[in-house]
Amino acid sequence: MIKFLFLIVVLALTSVTGCAPGDGFDKSSSDKIVAWHWMTDREDAFTELAEKYKALTGTDVQFELYAPTDAYSEKIKGAAQTKTLPDIFGILADKRIISSFIKAGHVLNLSPYMDMDDGQWEKTFYAKALNVNRFLQGNEFEVSPGIYAVPLDVMNIQMIYNKDLFKKAGLDPENPPKNWAEFLDAGNKLHAAGIQGMVSGWGEIWMIDCLASNYAYNIMGEQKFVDTIKGEASYADQDWIEVFTVFKDMRDNNLLANGIVTMVNKHAEQMFANQRAALAFNGSWCVNVYNGMNPDLNYGVMLPPVYSDKYPMKIWGGAGASLMVSARSKNIDKTIKFLKWLTAKDQQAYLANKTCNLPSNKESLGEIPQALEQFVDDMDSVTHPSNLNVSEFPKVIEARDKGIQSIIIGEKTPEEVALEVQAVKIRELKKQKARK
Amino acid sequence: MQKPIYYKIKKFMLMYSTHILLIIISLSCILPLLWMFSSSLKTQATVFSDMSLFPQNPHWENFYIAWTKGGFGRYFFNSLLYTIVVVSGIVFITSLAAYGISRLKIPGKNVIFYVFLAAMMIPIPGAFVALYVLLNKLGFLNPNTGFPLLDNVIMRLGYILPLINSGLSLGIYMLKTFFDKMPGDLEDSARIDGCSVFGIYWHIALPMAKPAIAVIIIFNTLNVWNEYLLAMLVLTGKSLMPLTRALMVFRGTHITEYPLLMSGMTITVIPIIIIYLMLQKHIIAGITAGAVKG
Amino acid sequence: MGIRKTKKIFINYLFVLPAILLFCTFHLYPFLNVFRYSLFQWDGIVEFSSAKFVGLAHFKDIFTANPQWWYSMWHAFYVTLLTLIFQNGLALLLALACDRAIKGARAYRMIFFLPPVLSGIVVGLIWQWIYDGNYGLLNHWLTNIGFGHLARAWLADPRTALTCVGIVHMWKGFGWGFIILLAGLQSIPRELYEAAKVDGAGAWDTFRRVTVPLMVPVFVLVTILTILNTMQIYDLIVSLTGGGPGYHTEVPITRILAAMRGGSQLGYACALGIVFGLILLVVSFVQIQASKLAKQE
C-alpha cells in the first residue's frame, strides 16, 4: 500500500512539472479577440469561421466553449466581478440580469456602430431579433437606451403536430385546429383513437410560461399584459383567470399527454419523434432534433389555436443566441469588425445550414434548410417578454407557472391560482418599494 | 436424525433466498450499464426506438467518432493528472490530520475536528463567485510569470487546490473513525523501539487504515473524474480541461447526440471501474489488518 | 523538559497544518464571504460595493414569508428518512452477506458499485423510461400482474413523485453505504466470531453482541454521510421532475439555486444556504450525541 501511494505521489509530481508540451498558450498577445460561448452545437462552425477570418484579415479570433449553461453563467458572473470578461461573450438571462451587467459597465452599447453608415448594420437584422437586445427610452431598468447585443440567430416557439397521427384519429392533417372548439375537439378525437395529446418540457417552467403568455396576449392584449406587470392590473382579473382556464380546458379535453407537468423537454422531444404523442409545444430548434431521431417523421407547424377573438395570438420568439462586446475590451474596433463579418449574409447562411438555426440576417433567408421555412412564415406573430420595457418578478413568474402545474394535476382551480399569484405580486411590489 | 436435515434445509433456504436477493439487485445494477453500452452502438434514430440490448447492426465506429470528435486524448491525460494529484493530496493530507486528531496530543484538536465536520455540512452556493474572486486575487486565473510552463502549472493548481480542499472534511472524518478503533499496543511497542511520531504514522497507522483509505480513494476519484463545474469556472482554454469537457460536445443546448454521448460515457466509466477493481482487494485486505491485532 | 514538550506539540501540529491551511484559504474565506453576502441585497453581478446592506432582513423573510422553503426542507427530510431506513438497511444486509464467504461475493462487490459510477444522465434517462405514464416499464409490469388500476404518470402525481425520486436516489446511493459498511465489517477480527461460536452464540446473538458494538462508529459515519448526501439531493430532482408538479418535489438546493440563478438574488441565496447549513449541523450533532449515548449503554 505504501509503495502504491508512493508511486502515485511520484507519478503525480513528475507529471505536474513535466506536462504542458507546448500548449500554445499565449496570453500576452492582446490583439487576439477572445470569445466565450456556451453553444456546444456550434463549436466546430465557430472554429471554422475563425480560421476563415484569420486567413481573410490576419486577426486571430479564439472561441472558447464553456458548457453546460449553468457553469457558463457562473463563469460570466465571476469574470464580471473580477473585470476579466473576454472581448465577446453572451449572457443567458432575462433583461433584468442583463441590465445589471450593463449598469456595472461590462457591456458596450452597440447603437453607435449599428447606426453607422445610415444604419447599414442594423438593417441587416430582423427588427424582432434586435428588439430582444434593445433597451428603450424610459425602461424600468434605468439603462441608457440602445442595442447591447448582436443576435446570431432567431427562433420561435410554436405547436407542432404529427400529420400521420392526426390522420389516424380522423383529423385533417392539412387543416390543424384554428380555434378553441376545434382544438378541444381534436383532443377528444385523439384520445378516442388512443393517441396521447401534447408533450412539452413543462417540467422546466419557462416553457409553461411561454404558452401562458401566448394566451395572455390573445385574451387581454399586450397593453393589459404590460399593465399587470407594472402592477396596475390584477392577476385576479377575469382575463387572467381565463388564461389559467386554458390549461384546465386542455387537460379536461385530453390535450395534454400523461405526465407533461414534470416532463423535461428532451424527454418530450423523444416522445414526439417516436410518434408517441400527436402534438408538441417546442421551439424551432426541434426541426434538427426530430430529424436526427426520426427522419421520416411527418409533421406540420401551427400557431396555438386562438382562445379569444379579441386579440391576435402571439408566440414567443426573437433572438436565439446573442453576443455582447465587453466595454472593457482593448480591441473594440477589431471586435466590432469581426461581429459585422460574422453576421454578414454568407457567414449567417453558413451557420444556418451547418447548425439548422434560423439566421438573424434577413438576407440569408433564401438559403436556409427547407424544414425551417414553416417557422419563418410565422415570424410575424412573434413577440418576446424581453421586448417590453418592464419585466415580471421571478417569484411571480414562478408562482404563475407552478400554479399552472397545479391546475393541470387537478390540485387547484384557475381562480385559486389567480388569487395566489396576485398575492405574491403584491408582496413583491411592496418589497420593491421598500428597496427604493 | 431429523435435526441435521432441518438445519440443512434451513441453511439451504437461507442461502437460496440470499442469492435470489443478491441476483435481483445485481441485475438492476447491471442493466443500466448494459443499456448505456448498447445505446452507444445504435444510431440517433434507433437509440430510443430499438429497445434491444444487443442491436443487430452495432455501430462500433461510434467509439472512434466519439474519441476523435470529443478530443478525448488530451482531456484523458488532464483528467488522469488531476485525479492522481488531487486524490493523493487528499489521502496524504487527511490521513496526517486524522492521525493527529485521533492519536496525538494537540491542544484544541476537538475544535479543529468539529470545524471540519461542520464545513462538510454547510453548502456554500454563493461560494462560486467568492472562489473566483479569491483565485483571481491569488493569481491562479491569469498568471503571467513570463514562463509559459510555470503559468500552466499555476493555472492547474488553481483547479487542484480547491478540489483537494473539497475532499478534506469527509476524509478526515472517515479516517478518524478508523484510527479511533485502532488498538494502541502496536504504537506503544513502536514508540519503545524508538520510532518517531511520523514513523509510527507512516509504518503502522497508515497500513492499518488501508480499507478506509481505499474507500476514500474510490470516493474522491469518482468525484474528481466526474467534476466539471469547477473546471469550467476556473480553467481557461481547452488545453487544461478534464475529460468531462469532451462529453459536453455531445450535449448540445438543444441537440443531444445520444449514441456518441453514450460511447463517450462508456469510455469515461471504464477507468473508474478498473480503479475500483484494483482497490477492492484492499478493502478486503482489512482481514489481515484485523488479524494483526489478535 | 518544557521546551521538549513544546517542541513535541509543535511537531504534532504539523500533522494538521496542511489541512488547516488549505481549509482556511478555500473554505473558510469563501464561507465568510457568503456570510457577508447574506446581509446584503445583491444580485452577484453589480459591484459588491454598490450592494445595499439589509442586515438580517433575508433571514427574517426566510423564517416568516417563505413557506416554499420549509416545504422543500420537509421533502429533503422525508427522502432522508426513507434513505436512512431502506437504503442503509439494504446496504447493511448486502454487506453482511458479502462479508461471509458466500459464493460470488467478489462479483457482487463489483456489481453493487456500478450505480454510483453511472452518469446522472443515464440514470435520468432510464428511470424516466421506467416511470413514464404511458409507455413506462413500471405501468407495463403492473398491468401484466393485474394491478393495472395503479398505473399512473409516476413522476407527475404529487402522491408518488417524491417517493419515486427517493427510490432512484437510494438505488444510486446504496453502493456507497455497502462499501463503507463492508470495509467496517472486514476490519472486525475473525477470532471474535470464532470465540462467539465456541461460546455457542447463534447468528443473531453474534450479530448483536459482536458486530453491532464494533460497528457503531461506522454506522454513525454512514448515517451522517447519508444525511448530508440526501439532504443535498439535487441532480436527480432536476433531471426527473424539475421540482414539480407544483412545489411537490422541491428540495432546499433547488430553492437556493432558483434564488441565485432565476431570481439573481445572491444575497438571499446565501442566507438560505446558511440556514440550511445550520439545520444540517444541528441534525448531525444530535445524531452524533445520540449514538454516543447508545454506545455507552
Image (cartoon, helix red, strand yellow):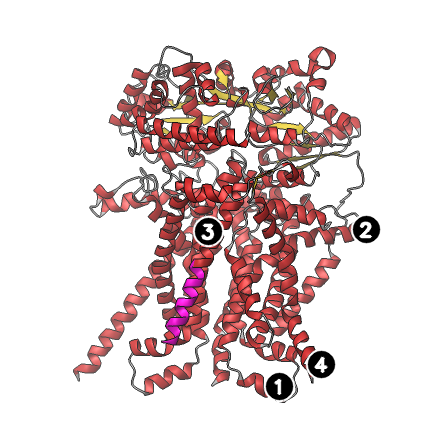
Image-based side of A314 in relation to B186, left or right: left
Q: CA distance from mark 1 to mark 3?
A: 44 Å
Find disc 3 in the rendering and name its residue: C232
Under circle 1, the secondary element is helix
Question: For the point 66% across and 37% down, which residue is it?
Answer: A80
Residue contact at pointers 2 and 1, CB within 8 angstroms: no
Q: Which mark is residue B147?
A: 2
Q: Which mark is residue B191?
A: 1
- Which label's residue is closer to the chain start, 2 or 1? 2
Q: Nearer the viewer, residue A336 or B279?
A: A336
Q: Quadrant of the N terminus of chain A?
A: bottom right
**What type is the residue that disc 3 sits on?**
Gln
The local crowd at label 1, few if under 14, some if 14 to 19, many if 20 or more residues have their Cα within 10 Å, is some
Point out the stretch of residues depicted in magenta: C283-297
Find disc 4 in the rendering and name its residue: C3
Query: Do tags 2 and 1 sit on the same chain?
Result: yes
Residue contact at pointers 4 and 3, CB within 8 angstroms: no
Between circles 4 and 3, the one closer to the viewer is: 4
Q: CA distance from mark 4 to mark 3?
A: 48 Å
